[in-house]
Image: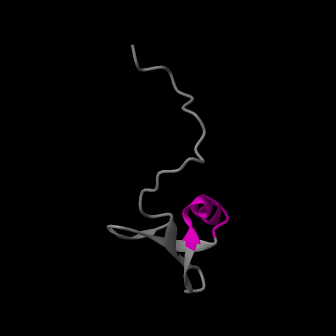
Amino acid sequence: MLIRVRYKDGRIDLVPSQNLNELIMMSEIDQFERSAGWVIVGKDPIRSTLRGSYMGSERRS
């Protein structure tokens, strides 16, 4: 799937969805578009597969 992104220089482009995390990590983009509208990187919540595993105490029984 292609996702619309806005680069820091203002350019808008379509990129493959598998490249989105890499662009976010490298601080290449300011925004990307979801069905609900534009997401601002660093401001709006973003689910990431880049997070490490949970390191706190186990809360499930």
The C terminus sits in image quarter: top left
Residue 2 position (above or below residue 61)? below
Residue 14 position (above or below residue 54)? below
On whether residue 54 falls in the magenta region, the answer is no
Most common SS among magenta residues: helix
50 relative position to 5: left or right: right
Residue 39 lies, in percent from the top left, at 42, 68
Q: Residue 44, located in which quarter of the rendered image?
A: bottom left
Q: Residue 9, located in which quarter of the rendered image?
A: bottom right
Residue 31 lies, in percent from the top left, at 49, 72
Task: Identify the residue at image location x=45%, y=69%.
Answer: 40
Task: Identify the residue at image location x=44%, y=64%.
Answer: 43
The mark total stands at 0
Residue 25 lies, in percent from the top left, at 64, 60
On whether residue 20 falls in the magenta region, the answer is yes
Q: Which residues are magenta?
A: 15-27
**The residue positioned farthest toward the top in the image shown:** 61
Q: Nearer the viewer, residue 6 or 59?
A: 6
Task: Identify the residue at image location x=35%, y=67%.
Answer: 35
Task: Identify the residue at image location x=53%, y=50%.
Answer: 48
Residue 51 position (above or below residue 46)? above
